[in-house]
Image (cartoon, rainbow, N blue to C red):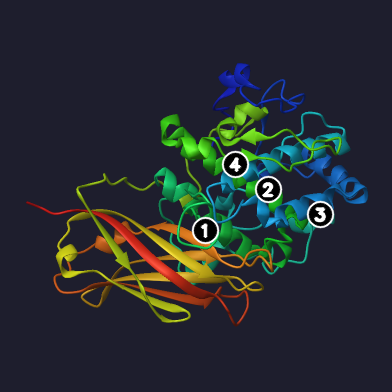
């Protein structure tokens, strides 16, 4: 991949636009966040991170970052706040590294999952190395295949499917649903790495967390580049974010979500990459059509559910379909919800949603998933969706995850 072309350098003049008083003293020119696999061990950004981490731990800043991420009152998981909240955490973390390292233009590297393995330096360098379940030689692709995950489209998801929903709406007690940006690549990588990364209440303790979330942030920029500003609904734009600490330990100003839509607003960008990450490779869009059908799933056991498609909907030729799944995750072990679509008893589609344990921080989660594949093929008699919760392969032997509710919303088209 050609990483040399800087996609939005022309936007440097927009730095600082619309951020309601946020300290942008570092954002005088766009800093380029680069893939860690392209950096040498003595690269200035890696050297800065290596210097800063021990000092941040000594000053208590490292512990503050872990505690902030573990505070689920921020509503930054199972919610459409996921992407903007984590973007802001990365911004303030990046500035802390700049402060402690003395490198004012520090740019956080990202872990490109296309590399298929944990970056070698994250295991070989003692400052970055951690006890992890994944070995340095373990293949991400092989892990995905063992756990039923295929390389399929995410960045072409509509806003609600990609971002999720707000916490003040929806079926769960807290409201809200995770979008595919969270439950797919994000959760999968946490489960793949394991160790502290395998739990949301401890994951920032692993330096790899920051490079992982930097890639999530890059994926958002890819989604944004393919979609217009008008797709961000006003209630999302008005979401307010606070609780972050600035580089002097003071409470940072409140920022609304609308101010987080462009990386240039915070003084950084990513290299141009025509190839989307493997988990988010482009897939064709489907247009919304005519009639809406709402289906409720039957919970058969604590870890299995079945959705039966009514006979009149089986003949639909195309669909834009969204499933809402509410679960009570195992607080200590990663798990996966497997979805099989059966047409006349034959599997025609499958997908998996990854669940990351969060200790006692969060008692239930909602997830939103595209189920367009539920109408693949040409069934004439029966069509059903089977959901099963299982432990994540290679990351534990039992799971206490339970399915609480399953709802499917489909917009269908019939041939005339």
Q: Nearer the viewer, residue 139 or 386?
A: 386
Residue 147 visible in the displayed image: no
Residue 205 horizontal/vertical position (percent): 77, 57
Residue 12 visible in the displayed image: yes
Query: Closer to the camera: disc 4 or disc 2?
Result: 4
Query: Closer to the camera: disc 4 or disc 3?
Result: 4
Element under disc 4: helix
Pick out the residue farthest to the right.
58
Mark 2: few/some/many CA within 10 Å (<14, 14-19, 20+): many
Q: Nearer the viewer, residue 292 or 286?
A: 292
Element under disc 1: helix
Q: Are marks 2 and 3 in contact (CB under 8 Å)?
A: no
- CA separation, marks 1 and 2? 18 Å
Mark 3: few/some/many CA within 10 Å (<14, 14-19, 20+): few
User: Left of 50 or right of it: where is 284?
Assistant: left
Q: Earlier in the sequence, mark 4 or mark 2?
A: 4
Query: Which residue corresponds to mark 1?
Result: 183
- CA separation, marks 4 and 3? 31 Å
Residue 376 horizontal/vertical position (percent): 24, 61
- CA separation, marks 1 and 4? 16 Å
**Disc assigned to residue 211:** 2
Query: Closer to the camera: disc 2 or disc 3?
Result: 2
Q: Earlier in the sequence, mark 4 or mark 3?
A: 4
Q: Residue at x 87, y 46 (%)?
A: 56
User: Left of 5 or right of it: where is 202?
Assistant: right
Q: Earlier in the sequence, mark 1 or mark 4?
A: 4
């Amino acid at each position: 991949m050609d990483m040399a072309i800087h996609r939005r350098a022309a936007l440097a003049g927009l730095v600082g636009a619309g951020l309601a008083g946020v300290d942008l003293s570092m954002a005088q020119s766009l800093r380029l966040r680069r893939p860690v696999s392209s950096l040498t061990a003595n690269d200035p950004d890696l050297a800065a991170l290596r210097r800063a981490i021990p000092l941040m731990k000594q000053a208590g800043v490292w512990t503050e970052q872990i505690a902030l991420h573990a505070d689920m009152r921020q509503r930054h998981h199972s919610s459409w706040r996921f992407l903007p909240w984590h973007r802001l955490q990365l911004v303030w973390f990046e500035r802390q590294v700049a402060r402690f390292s003395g490198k004012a233009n520090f740019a956080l590297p990202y872990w490109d999952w296309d590399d298929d393995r944990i970056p070698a330096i994250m295991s070989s360098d003692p400052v970055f190395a951690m006890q992890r379940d994944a070995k340095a030689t373990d293949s991400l692709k092989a892990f995905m295949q063992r756990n039923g995950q295929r390389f399929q489209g995410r960045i072409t998801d509509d806003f609600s499917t990609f971002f999720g929903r707000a916490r003040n709406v929806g079926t769960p007690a807290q409201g809200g649903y995770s979008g595919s940006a969270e439950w797919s690549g994000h959760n999968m990588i946490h489960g793949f790495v394991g160790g502290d990364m395998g739990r949301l209440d401890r994951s920032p303790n692993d330096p790899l967390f920051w490079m992982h979330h930097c890639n999530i942030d890059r994926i958002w920029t890819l989604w944004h580049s393919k979609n217009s500003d008008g797709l961000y609904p006003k209630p999302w734009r008005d979401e307010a974010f606070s609780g972050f600490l600035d580089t002097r330990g003071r409470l940072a100003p409140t920022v609304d979500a609308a101010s987080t839509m462009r990386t240039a607003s915070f003084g950084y960008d990513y290299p141009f990459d025509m190839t989307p990450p493997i988990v988010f490779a482009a897939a064709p869009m489907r247009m919304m059509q005519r009639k809406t059908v709402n289906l409720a799933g039957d919970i058969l056991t604590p870890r299995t559910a079945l959705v039966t498609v009514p006979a009149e909907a089986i003949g639909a030729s195309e669909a834009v379909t969204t499933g809402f799944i509410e679960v009570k995750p195992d607080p200590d072990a990663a798990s996966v919800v497997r979805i099989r679509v059966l047409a006349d008893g034959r599997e025609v589609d499958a997908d998996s949603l990854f669940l990351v344990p969060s200790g006692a921080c969060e008692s239930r989660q909602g997830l939103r998933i595209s189920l367009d594949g539920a109408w693949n093929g040409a069934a004439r008699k029966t069509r059903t969706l089977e959901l099963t919760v299982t432990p994540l392969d290679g990351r534990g032997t039992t799971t206490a995850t339970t399915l609480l509710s399953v709802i499917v919303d489909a917009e269908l088209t019939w041939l005339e």
